[in-house]
Image (cartoon, helix red, strand yellow):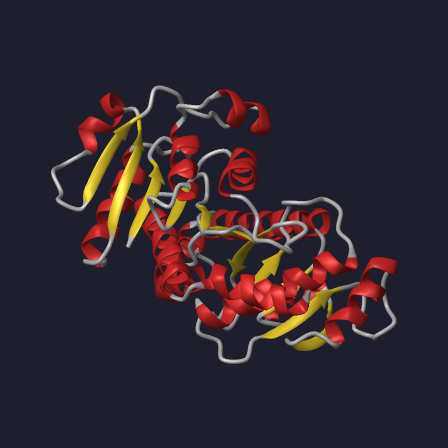
Amino acid sequence: MKFAIDGMGGDNAPKEIIAGVYEALDAFTDLEIVLYGDEAKMAPFLKDHNRLQVVHCTEVIEGTDEPVRSVRRKKDASMVRMAQAVANGEVDACVSAGNTGALMAAGLFIVRRIDGIDRPALSTTLPTLDGAGFDMLDLGANADAKPENLLQYAIMGSIYAREVRGIENPTVGLLNIGTEDKKGNELAKHAFALLKDAPINFVGNVEARELLNHAADVVITDGFTGNMVLKTIEGVAGSIFSLLKEQLMSSTKTKIAAAMIKPNLKVIKDKMDYSEYGGAVLFGLKAPVIKAHGSSKGHAFFSAIRQAKKMAEHNVCATIDSTISKEN
């Protein structure tokens, strides 16, 4: 199995990207990696490895670059070269922590969609209080959606939860403003009718306040709503930890208390730690394309590579292809 990696994407590239690459090579003896990027900038962090190939690229897509224009114009960018390797069949999957919009554009225009998929969806696994996590899509690949798009998201998310996360019969919920069958706007009502008859374990509408209580294994919504929910969860979690730290460090008494409950706080932190869940998947493409978190350190990037490996091993894209073909 061979993967392409964007060595220049993300806030901590190339150092932490390369650290994640070596962790993956140590963990998976059947994995080969092709690392794309500026060889001079990557050189201080590289060491010889018989399953690692480095390809020099003269351009980088920056976080501030306009996504579509940069993919079309920067032909020698590490992200573009990486995606092209997937499209050419030279590698089985690709991973980047770089510009999210540019990676989605590279996926759409270079790797390309599975036949029958109208709109790809961005998804990631978010933490739950029981530690199991749930997959949510779409998280922003498309601001608008039709009921048929939500149906395809549900099928793709269900396949991923079963094949990659090992959930035998994953539950699928539709994000809505209430749990009653008739709740929601026209999109939600029409999508509900389609999901009810789909070949998935649909459990009905779920509310945003129940997401972290594991309301479903897979939660479906349009990209505009999904992106706002994602950023709300991230913001609230960060704010709570900041407030907790502020209070625990406010006096000698609370500092002593903090030392006593430190192991318990670590349990909470580990449950909410995105680095163990991997990255965001761009569902609906012909091969696995994984977006690692922009601030990924080495282990978080390793988790994204591990995620791509599970997708490739379980032929997730091929399964989505065959399932969508039957539905059409």
Look at 13% across and 36% down and name the residue there: 47
Look at 65% across and 76% down and name the residue there: 199
Image vertical order of residue 101 relative to residue 311, above or below:
above
Residue 191 left/right relative to 218: right
| Number of numbered discs | 0
Q: Nearer the viewer, residue 167 or 322?
A: 322
Which x, y percent locates residue 206? Answer: 72, 69
Residue 143 left/right relative to 265: right
Image vertical order of residue 284 relative to residue 94, above or below:
below
Is residue 34 in sight in this rendering? yes
Is residue 64 in sight in this rendering? no
Quadrant into which the C terminus falls: bottom right
Which x, y percent locates residue 317? Answer: 49, 59
Look at 44% across and 42% down and name the residue there: 87
Which x, y percent locates residue 15? Answer: 28, 34
Which x, y percent locates residue 25? Answer: 21, 51
Q: Nearer the viewer, residue 152 or 136?
A: 152
Quadrant into which the N terminus falls: bottom left
Quadrant of the rendered structure where residue 82 is? top left
